[in-house]
DNA sequence: GGCCAGGACACCA
DNA sequence: TGGTGTCATGGC
């Protein structure tokens, strides 16, 4: 009686990541989209809320929730901190998983209390120190933490999201099995440690992801044409 | 009506 | 330690 072995196909890394390749991808994107220096939000505080609200959610749904908070004058630490999560929840309904996210926002606001309610103040600590603390906050995982640290606090950490995974999988630098930390280490090892570059690079990735590199590849007018291996992920 | 969208976490084997 | 279910809305 033989043992039935389920075949496991793990694609090898098809291209060896190096500094030149990663920078050439960045320059192609920047050539197409211009300099982004970006996160949609008028303040560092709004960036933090957006980072939590966009968890597994399209940005258009996040914008609706942020719009409700803005119209009610709640897009500030001082205003929102006063509300219990049960009152935040209905305001962010459009962002999906709203009860969960309301609790996560409340947890983050309690954490931010130690920094005077100012996300920029996170940068007064070292990156490893503040990142560890942020990851202890319930509902703040690696991507959310890094988005807050990079885009709200200005610290040099590369954000890995679904777009990053998809695009670099199709470029042959990832095999689709890597952990968040592994992908982040790849970027850290092959790019200069520069918050401005990390900010703009990830912004370019998101833009490409939104406009071209979707789950079901449409592969319209892609600036990475010729480098993409057109693999589905 | 189903799939997808810039995740995170609890639970289970 | 890795896999799976859950949270849940809105656009296509």
Image (cartoon, coloured by chain):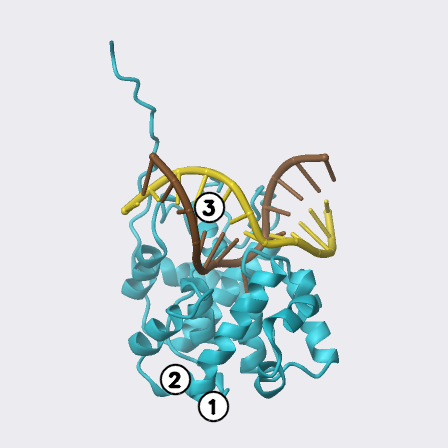
Chain colours: A cyan, B brown, C yellow
Query: Nearer the N terminus, badge 3 or badge 1?
Result: 1
- The residue at 45%/45% (across/down) is A170
Instruction: Tell me the CA gap for discs 3 and 1.
Output: 45 Å
Residue A38 can be seen, yes or no: no
Dot 1, crowdedness within 10 Å: few (<14), some or many (≥20)? few
Instruction: Tell me the CA gap for discs 1 and 2.
Output: 13 Å
Report which residue position mark 3 lands on.
A228
Query: Nearer the N terminus, badge 2 or badge 3?
Result: 2
The quadrant holding residue A56 is bottom right
- Judge whether A14 appears above or below A71 on screen: above
Q: Judging from the image, what secondary structure is the residue with disc 2 in? A: helix
Q: Judging from the image, what secondary structure is the residue with disc 3 in? A: loop
The reply to whether label 2 and label 3 mark residues of one chain is yes
Report which residue position mark 2 lands on.
A123
Q: Quadrant of the N terminus of chain A?
A: top left
Query: Nearer the N terminus, badge 1 or badge 2?
Result: 1
Report which residue position mark 1 lands on.
A116
Q: Callout 3: residue from which chain? A: A
Dot 2, crowdedness within 10 Å: few (<14), some or many (≥20)? some
* Side (left or right) of A42 relative to A232: right
Of marks 1 and 2, the one in the foreground: 1
Of marks 3 and 1, the one in the foreground: 1
Question: x, y (%) of residue A207?
Answer: 57, 61
Q: Callout 2: residue from which chain? A: A
């Amino acid at each position: 009686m033989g043992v039935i072995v389920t075949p496991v196909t793990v694609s090898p890394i098809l291209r060896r990541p190096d500094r030149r390749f990663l920078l050439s991808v960045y320059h192609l994107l920047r050539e197409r989209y211009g300099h982004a220096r970006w996160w949609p939000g008028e303040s560092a505080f709004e960036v933090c809320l957006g980072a939590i609200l966009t968890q597994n959610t399209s940005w258009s749904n996040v914008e609706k929730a942020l719009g409700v908070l803005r119209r009610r004058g709640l897009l500030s630490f001082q205003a929102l901190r006063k509300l219990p999560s049960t009152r935040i929840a209905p305001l962010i309904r459009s962002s999906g998983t709203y009860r969960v996210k309301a609790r996560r926002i409340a947890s983050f606001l309690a954490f931010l209390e130690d920094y005077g309610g100012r996300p920029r103040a996170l940068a007064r600590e070292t990156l490893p120190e503040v990142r560890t603390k942020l990851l202890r906050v319930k509902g703040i995982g690696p991507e959310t933490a890094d988005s807050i640290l990079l885009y709200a606090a200005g610290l040099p950490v590369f954000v890995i999201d679904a777009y990053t995974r998809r695009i670099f999988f199709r470029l042959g630098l990832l095999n689709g099995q890597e952990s968040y930390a592994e992908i982040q280490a790849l970027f850290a090892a092959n790019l200069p440690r520069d918050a401005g570059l990390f900010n703009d690079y990830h912004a370019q990735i998101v833009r490409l992801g939104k406009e071209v590199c979707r789950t079901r590849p449409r592969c319209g007018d892609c600036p990475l044409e010729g480098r993409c291996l057109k693999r589905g992920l």
